[in-house]
Image (spheres, helix red, strand yellow):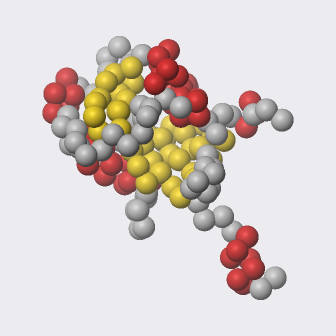
Amino acid sequence: MAANEHEAKMAHPRMAAGALFFDVDGRVLMVEPTYKDYWDIPGGYVETGESPLQAASREVREELGITPSLGCLLAVDWAPNGAEGDKVLYLFDGGELSRDLVEAIRLQADELKAVRFVPPHEIAERAIPRLARRILAAIEARAASTPVYLEHGQAPGNLAA
């Protein structure tokens, strides 16, 4: 196989990374983007030369104006999108935000309209289905202290045939 044929078969996924933050009651911090019709978590695309963890930290700083340390990887999700192609999404544990950090949040006005802590049972009402599945799987992974691999927000054993 010629090098260019091999290159053509290789995946070139877009990568994105985000962080899950919690309050003392176990609710998840979600943001309301100005450019989407559903709620999301802080995060965004990984830039050239940047690791997923660096991207998640940068996006939190840009979107929320805070710089908390991010912890371990909670989930990796292979989530191709018809319009954007192959995507690999990383979710990191942002831990429980202190009251001081919550009060220091300053939304990036051109990207975000609102921020709110949401109980896990309400996440599916605010997010698109595969994002809701990803967040809930990451919450379970955090509780188990074991990262999870997902496809379209689901563990491969849970995918429909």
Q: Residue at x 33, y 40 (%)?
A: 34
Residue 107: quarter of image: top left
* Residue 57 x %, y %: 33, 48
Horizontal relation, residue 93 to residue 152: left or right: left
Judge from the rendering whether residue 79 lies leftward or rightward of residue 25; answer left or right. Answer: right
**Quadrant of residue 109 in the image?**
top left
Residue 17, x across and y down, in percent:
45, 48
Percent coordinates x, y for residue 3 in the rendering: 72, 84
Q: Residue at x 61, y 57 (%)?
A: 85
Whether residue 62 is situated above or below residue 129 in the rendered picture: below
The reply to whether residue 24 is in sight is yes
Viewed as shown, does residue 102 lie left or right of 149? left
Quarter placement of the N terminus: bottom right
Picture quarter with the C terminus: top right
Residue placed most toward the observer, 158 or 69 = 158
Residue 150 left/right relative to 157:
left
> Residue 31 location in percent, x, y?
35, 33
Which of the two residues, 27 or 96, is positioned nearer the viewer here? 27
Q: Residue at x 42, y 16 (%)?
A: 119
Q: Nearer the viewer, residue 28 or 122?
A: 122
Q: Is residue 61 visible?
A: no
Residue 101 versus residue 122 in the image, above or below = below
Query: In percent of the image, x 53 and y 31: which residue is there?
Result: 128
Location of residue 143 with respect to 157 vertically, above or below? above
